[in-house]
Amino acid sequence: MANRRQFLRTLAGVAALSVTADASSLGRMRRLRMYAAMPEAGAHDRLEPDSYRRKVRQVQAEMKKRKLNALVLLNATNVIYTTGYFHLPTERPLAALIPESGDPALFIPELEADQVKLWWVKDYETYFDFPGPVNRVRWIFERLAKRGLGSGRIGVEEPTPGRRQQMNLGAPKATLVDAGDLIENLRWVKDEDELRIMRRAMYFADFVVQAGREFVQHNGRVTEDQILKASADALADKMSAELNDVVGVGIEPPFGGLVPFGKRSAFPHAVPSKDRLNSGDALVLSFGAQVGGYNVECERSFYVGKPTDYARRLYDAMLAAHDTGVENLREGAIAEEVDRKSLDQIRKAGFEKFLKHHTGHGIGLEGHESPWIAEGDKTVLKEGMTFSCEPGVYDPDWGGFRHSDTVIVRKDKGEIMNKYPTRLEDMIIEI
């Protein structure tokens, strides 16, 4: 794997950024300054209608294999995946109908009516509000019956018993077929349009890690919540200034990430505290970015001051696992085998007792989605799948290290979207 000390180089339409060491007026502080050119984002920072039309045709091809006359999607993420209709999911049911041919239709609460008129899906029906005089899932299936689908084979997304009952009441002659895996499996493999949006998101994810790092370098013994707030503010300002579209953009609470240090860096999902950073601490900056609905991750582990021999051993074990995972995210590999080969690097280093989680997870419209690079997942990887690669090593009496890259499965090895450095010499902060 190439050393990414000169990170955020121009690759696949991502901005050219470089790292320079600057002997500043802040004494011993080694400052890394990031100089960014605007990445080639295209006219839009989201998928356009033609991309969704292609997805609908892909869905219809899978429906034909299962002899489905229609597919009803009530899962908000799957509605977005197929139609691109972003909305605020609430208690009010909102559904997409994918017929066996032709364009989709939307069934929406009235408060969405003005917004839906701005999008490419022109066939829609509305109900006033929730809960209403008739159960709204039943109402949706009554609309299907009126469209001539009342006696057809209707694919549904693994409904709860209560929802299935309402579906049956709305279309009593229909045959309901569990088809929850149909969209899930299509979402696994990203096309070039989706990957372009994810690369755009990665530009911001790499940026926010650097913003967190620079805040620490400038301010010294800061608290975790201060790092989070400063980083989120920097990211929000940059996204506001540079994005062409802000649909499907998010910064997750609290303030958008995880930034544990010291012994708390051994907590993989540490919530923020008021502890103050000290020399000798490990520091994890764990951030993501979401653009056009698509998520990516950039997590980096730093060391404050001169690393001890023990810190180097822990870090090297983590990095070997990370690099091995990336190497093995290739077409035809078995998910659980990639996990085993990755985590074996930590076991061989003598730190098996410091393992707390698997190597990675699928990532796309959801930050965590299937498949899983984990024991028990026997999925055969396909080119275009995207995963986090984030093995970690966690000593509860000292601290921990974890990098996370977002990786595309390719024929021979994984392609890392991130451009931020990973080697220990580039991860040292002096305060």
Image (tube, rainbow, N blue to C red):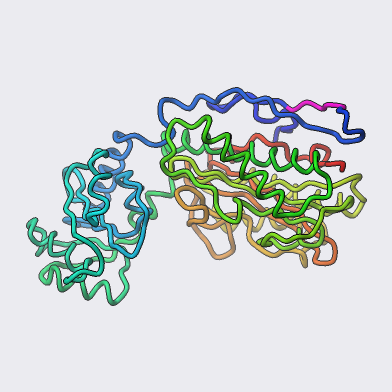
Please identify the quadrant where the C terminus is shown: top right
Foreground pick, 252 / 147: 252
Please identify the quadrant where the N terminus is shown: top right
Quick check: 309 left or right of 188? right
**Image quadrant assignment for residue 15:** top right
Foreground pick, 64 / 89: 89
Foreground pick, 127 / 195: 127
Residue at left offset 52%, top offset 52%? 367
Residue 74 location, x and y as percent? 30, 60
Quick check: 7 left or right of 49? right
**Is 359 rendered above or below residue 354?**
above
Is residue 192 visible in the rendered structure shown here?
no
Residue at left offset 70%, top offset 57%? 343
Magenta region: 19-23
Quick check: 37 left or right of 57? right
Q: Main secondary structure of the magenta part?
A: strand
Residue at left offset 28%, top offset 44%? 115
Residue 66 location, x and y as percent? 24, 57
Residue 6 location, x and y as percent? 73, 28
Residue at left offset 63%, top offset 24%? 16
Is residue 307 visible in the rendered structure shown here?
yes
Taking the magenta stretch, the answer to whether it contains residue 395 is no
Residue 414 location, x and y as percent? 59, 41
Quick check: 413 left or right of 130? right
How many dots with numbers?
A: 0
